[in-house]
């Protein structure tokens, strides 16, 4: 894959990548940083991708990993000077967004990938390096817990 | 989901995010190129380091440190290309004061993990010691099976006069008990930075000993001059105190010519198991934490796990194979051997009879379907028979450790009984066929 194709395929899913970053990282600045790191890592490791058809899921996986890495680094480097926050964009349904944030990440991410991005459980399993059965269970738990949180919010 | 439209929980992608992504992509090739080039020290320092490394007999270069160089020594060409590709560049960096630590690469091969790093001291006028204090893998405490022996004063005495930032590579190999369910290895490493308390002093038998070989002698003289030029004293050689313990007791911080704060591993006098730094010679000034995630999904296609084998009798032992896991980088074996006469009541008696050099113990190699012994890659860290206490309080033999890795899946494990020689050389062709046990291997995946 040449650089032009790489750029085009990345930009074709830029909204999805932003939503994935939103699912894991609360700060807009961190979302930009993580996605940028993911681009670099993807470009450096493009030769390891054996089939271009899997580029989109492969990139999603890298973005997920980079977001998690950055979140951990932020949690550890409490004294690090952070850049001024970028304004966080408002979701159309802030109550639902807040409820989603209360879910454990291990439930939240597969739920989002399945119900927002439309990935199948097998695809999500590959992205998250989890058995498909575990993904199915996590989605089930996520829906149940989200319903309970929303009920509580009424 | 019927009740909620989850898309409502997500905002529109902001314009600045899209602009940032476009900008990142535009500069991607240049950024990626910069990130993939390892930092190099100044040329003069490179020469100084080369001299130190050659002098100290260090087998691998530390400045251009590569993970697979560390793992495989001189045989990286035998590594499958797919596995080479799966080495993950990490670029995880933390800085504190003048010290930068970067995790540069990682690899999980289905049984063993490995991690490499670079440490830079930006203020070489203040030499420090940086040690990996501890690490966790998926929140469980990790044990380094093989840790880089590079921990030394940074910069070492010979490079103290050079004002350039000093970079040193390091790394470790560790066993992972079972494949992680999460598909990742989350590693959290704690490095401790210490500085010398007393006046630095070099005490090293080799720095004062003349070499018959001209080249070695020239290097020794050059190294000695560099140390003296840096204003560091060199203790006169004392055969009764080659590593300067008497100076340490007087308050000096004693290091070897290459900056090590303890005698070289393998030193007969210390048996290679000396705690790092003598008490009171260094004080902790900082702690640096780094965290990274290794992808474990690449590994599954390479790791072969042998199916359970019925216990069997072999040349005076009852052998029980608990685990054989084979990967291109290592063969992990966990095997029990109970003497047919029964477990021993005394640890010392068992060790005396079966473990010490010159005594006979089962040894293992692997063979292909035609019975040919398969060639193995060299890897550091070979386990030996050890005494294992069982529930009754008695002792049996246990071999839990690693042999060289295998690229091909072997058809057989071959056990033979041979004296454990002091130099580690064993030749299966010298063993009578009647004393060889051929064990067909089946695999669980």
Image (spheres, coloured by chain):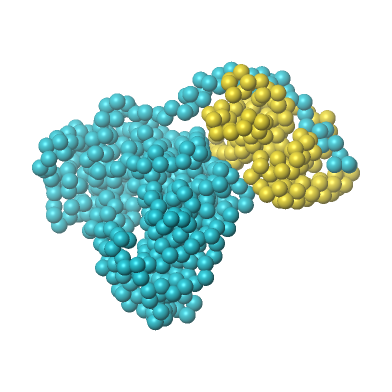
Marks counted in the figure total: 0
Res. B120 image quadrant: top left
Q: Colour of chain A?
A: yellow
A102 sits left or right of A44 in the view: right
Pick the quarter of the image with the C terminus of chain B. Answer: bottom right
The answer to whether A52 is drawn above or below residue B134 in the figure is: above
Residue drawn 29% across the image and 29% down it: B45
Q: Can the viewer see residue A96 in this picture?
A: yes
Instruction: Where is residue B226? Give x, y as percent.
Output: 20, 33
Pick the quarter of the image with the N terminus of chain B. Answer: top right
Instruction: Where is residue B406? Give x, y as percent.
Output: 44, 50
The answer to whether B438 is drawn above or below residue A31 in the figure is: below
Res. B271 image quadrant: bottom left
Instruction: Where is residue A105? Give x, y as percent.
Output: 70, 44
The answer to whether B155 is drawn above or below residue B388 in the figure is: above
Give A58 or B393, whichever is nearer the viewer.
A58
Instruction: Where is residue B160? Give x, y as percent.
Output: 27, 34
A107 sits left or right of B257 in the view: right
Residue drawn 54% across the image and 65% down it: B308
B136 sits left or right of B416 in the view: right
Residue drawn 22% across the image and 54% down it: B245
Q: What chain is colored cyan?
A: B
Residue drawn 75% across the image and 48% down it: A136
Q: Can the viewer see residue A105 in this picture?
A: no
Give B426 or A101, whichever is nearer the viewer.
B426
């Amino acid at each position: 894959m040449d650089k032009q194709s790489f750029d085009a395929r990345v930009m074709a899913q830029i909204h999805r990548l932003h939503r994935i970053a939103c699912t894991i990282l609360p700060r807009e600045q961190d979302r930009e940083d993580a996605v940028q790191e993911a681009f670099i890592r993807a470009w450096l490791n493009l030769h390891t991708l054996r089939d271009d058809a899997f580029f989109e899921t492969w990139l999603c996986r890298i973005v997920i990993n980079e977001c998690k890495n950055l979140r951990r680094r932020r949690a550890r480097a409490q004294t690090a000077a952070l850049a001024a926050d970028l304004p966080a964009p408002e979701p159309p349904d802030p109550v639902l967004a807040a409820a989603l944030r209360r879910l454990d990440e291990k439930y939240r991410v597969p739920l989002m990938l399945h119900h927002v991005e439309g990935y199948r459980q097998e695809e999500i399993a590959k992205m998250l390096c989890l058995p498909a059965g575990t993904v199915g269970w996590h989605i089930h738990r996520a829906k149940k817990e989200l319903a309970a949180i929303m009920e509580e919010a009424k | 989901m019927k009740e909620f439209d989850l898309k409502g929980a997500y905002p529109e992608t902001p314009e600045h995010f899209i602009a940032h992504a476009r900008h990142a992509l535009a500069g991607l090739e240049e950024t990626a190129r910069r990130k993939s080039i390892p930092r190099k020290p100044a040329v003069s320092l490179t020469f100084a380091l080369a001299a130190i490394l050659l002098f100290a007999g260090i087998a691998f270069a530390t400045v251009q440190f590569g993970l697979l160089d560390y793992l495989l020594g001189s045989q990286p060409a035998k590594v499958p290309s797919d596995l080479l590709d799966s080495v993950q560049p990490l670029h995880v960096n933390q800085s504190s004061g003048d010290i930068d630590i970067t995790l540069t690469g990682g690899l999980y091969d289905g049984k063993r993990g490995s991690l490499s790093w670079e440490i830079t001291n930006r203020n070489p006028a203040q030499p420090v010691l940086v040690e990996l204090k501890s690490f966790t893998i998926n929140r469980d405490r990790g044990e380094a099976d093989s840790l880089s022996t590079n921990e030394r004063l940074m910069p070492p005495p010979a490079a103290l006069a050079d004002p350039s930032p000093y970079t040193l590579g390091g790394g470790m190999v560790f066993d992972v008990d079972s494949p992680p369910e999460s598909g990742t290895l989350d590693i959290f490493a704690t490095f401790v930075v210490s500085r010398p308390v007393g006046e630095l002093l070099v005490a090293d038998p080799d720095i004062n000993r003349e070499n018959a070989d001209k080249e070695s002698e020239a290097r020794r003289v050059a190294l000695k001059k560099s140390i003296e030029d840096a204003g560091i004293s060199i203790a006169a050689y004392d055969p009764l105190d080659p590593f300067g313990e008497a100076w340490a007791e007087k308050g000096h911080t004693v290091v070897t010519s290459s900056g090590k704060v303890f005698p070289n591993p393998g030193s007969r006098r210390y048996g290679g198991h000396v705690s790092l730094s003598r008490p009171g010679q260094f004080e902790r000034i900082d702690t640096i934490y780094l965290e990274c995630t290794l992808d474990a999904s690449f590994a599954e296609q390479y790791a072969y796990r042998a199916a359970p084998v019925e216990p069997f009798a072999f040349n005076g032992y009852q052998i029980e194979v608990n685990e054989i896991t084979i990967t291109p980088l290592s063969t992990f074996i966990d095997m029990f051997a109970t003497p047919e006469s029964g477990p021993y009541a005394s640890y010392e008696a068992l060790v005396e009879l079966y473990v010490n050099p010159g005594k006979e113990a089962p040894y293992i190699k692997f063979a292909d379907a035609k019975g040919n012994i398969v060639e193995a890659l060299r890897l550091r860290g070979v386990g030996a028979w050890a005494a294992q206490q069982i529930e009754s309080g008695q002792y049996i033999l246990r071999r839990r450790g690693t042999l060289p890795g295998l690229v091909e899946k072997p058809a057989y494990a071959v056990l033979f009984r041979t004296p454990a020689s002091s130099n580690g050389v064993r030749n299966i062709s010298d063993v009578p066929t009647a004393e060889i046990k051929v064990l067909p291997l089946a695999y669980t995946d």
